[in-house]
Amino acid sequence: MMNDSKQFKGQIDWVTTLVPFGIVLALAVVFMLLPEQSKIFVDTVRGFLGDTCGLYYAVFGVGVLITTLYIAFSKYGKIKLGNLEKPAYSNFAWGTMIFTSTMAADILFYSLCEWALYGSEQHVVQMQGGMQTWAPTYTLFHWGPIAWCFYVILAVAFGFMIHVRKRDRQRFSEACRPLFGNRVDGAWGRVIDIIAIFSIICATATTFSLATPLLSKGISALTGLPDSVGLTIMILLLICAVYTLAVFFGMKGISKLASYCSYLFFALLFYFLFLGGETRYILETGFQSIGNLVQNFIGMSTHIDPLRETSFAQNWTIYYWAYWIAWCCATPFFIALISKGRTIKNMVLGTYGWGLAGTFMSFIILGNYGLAQQLKHGLDVVGTIGNEGMYTAILSIFDTLPLPWLAVLLLVITMIAFYSTTLDGITYVASSYSYKNISAEQEPSRKVRTFWSIMLIVFPIALLFAENTLYSLQSVTIIAAFPVVILSILITISFFKDAKKYMDK
């Protein structure tokens, strides 16, 4: 037993595991002790990166999208990830795991209200067609192909590294080995991995801290319990219990939970689409929005607003690209792991297909129902957001549905399931990151997975007690995207170098 314990400790990279937590904790303490000074500093840096360096993110987004499509339809797309005769998972199981383990938790929340956040934007109001045409179009754009391309490009590199080259270190630094050689085993490799883990922790903490208050309000409305920090903490602990249980069962547990999530998701969409009385409007607006997006995609992707007439691009598009870049430190590894047996082309197109299908269905059905209440029935969702906040505005939309309590109950259950599945994938990847060496066939130990399960929920709980800290850490997450762009470029170059070498044999 003693030898097993020593062996286990010898397998863990304690620096990579603990240092990012230490950095986040130190930042949180600084934000709490010096709230005003830290907010000013972080806002200044964030403003500089978003305003002065906006082109940096915009060019990167367009470039990555083009690169992923090139990879899919070039000779590299024919490379098979692993030597399996057929894929490790069925198309449905694979697709649901991709969707539910990436953006799904965020998608469900923002589908209900994001269109309204654009409602007061001068850029949207001034454009021909106004809110009706452009609010639903921009939701699809900001959660569309460019958002997903950041995940896809890294999933390609990691899939090739793990399944073809059979490397037993599942890390950002290892993906750079074809470019830097053994130098990734030293200090530079440590820096790369710490940046990646740091981004994962920050993105996870801020996302869950921002969205769980909606669950708290929903449960409060259903049960009569007071909407409080205590209730939100109980919800986070419940989510932690669910995904920890799933993680204990390994990939089979994650796959099962993903399937259950998809059924709940479809049930919620059905409720809004067919029971809300706006089926025709929802489908017509969705069809129009997709057409508008296709027609204007290049212009929207390259809109930077050089004169800063509205700063819409800086406040929204650049912000979103930075946020997705920070988030992409986690889930690409998961996509790569579950794609064994597929070709790179299949993984690229399948990830886009399943990801965009789930995303677009959510925003079209849930978002357009709320838009109908605003534009057709006089429900002032935009005004409610300005006066009472997003959470109250979302629940006001639910009040227009038949049996609103049942719809809210379905929302609560679905969001808890989605959050659990998203954290499942992140926990699995982060746990693998803690090992010095781990093969694709080897699952992280339960001890390590439990550690990450607990730690990834502790920070959201801590942030609930300090709104300013939450805002500042969210800004730090956006700032962290800057070096992640550089790492992503280096990993992409490494992939091309290594894949060319592999194919030239």
Image (spheres, rainbow, N blue to C red):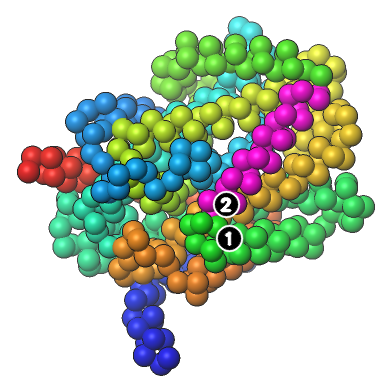
| Circle 2 residue | 256
Residue reaching furthest to the bottom? 2
Horizontally, residue 420 falls left or right of residue 272, namely left
Of the 4 image quadrants, the one containing the N terminus is bottom left
Which amino acid does the dot numbered 2 rest on? Answer: Lys
Residue 324 visible in this rendered orientation of the protein: no
Residue 233, position as x, y percentages in the image: 73, 62
Residue 218, position as x, y percentages in the image: 81, 46
Residue reaching furthest to the right? 224
Q: Do labels 2 and 1 touch, CB within 8 Å? A: yes
- Dot 1: within a 10 Å radius of its alpha carbon, few (fewer than 14), some, or many (20 or more) residues? many
Which amino acid does the dot numbered 1 rest on? Answer: Ala
Sooner in the amino-acid sequence: mark 2 or mark 1: 1
Identify the residue at image location x=26%, y=26%.
73
Q: Nearer the viewer, residue 146 or 412?
A: 412
- Dot 2: within a 10 Å radius of its alpha carbon, few (fewer than 14), some, or many (20 or more) residues? some
Residue 503 visible in this rendered orientation of the protein: yes
| Circle 1 residue | 246
Hey, which quadrant is residue 380 in on the image?
Answer: top right
Residue 334, position as x, y percentages in the image: 43, 51
Identify the residue at image location x=17%, y=50%.
179
Q: CA distance from mark 2 to mark 1?
A: 8 Å
Horizontally, residue 420 falls left or right of residue 498, namely right
Q: Is residue 47 above or below residue 459?
A: above
Q: Nearer the viewer, residue 172 or 5?
A: 5
Hey, which quadrant is residue 168 in on the image?
Answer: bottom left
Magenta-tinted stretch: 254-276
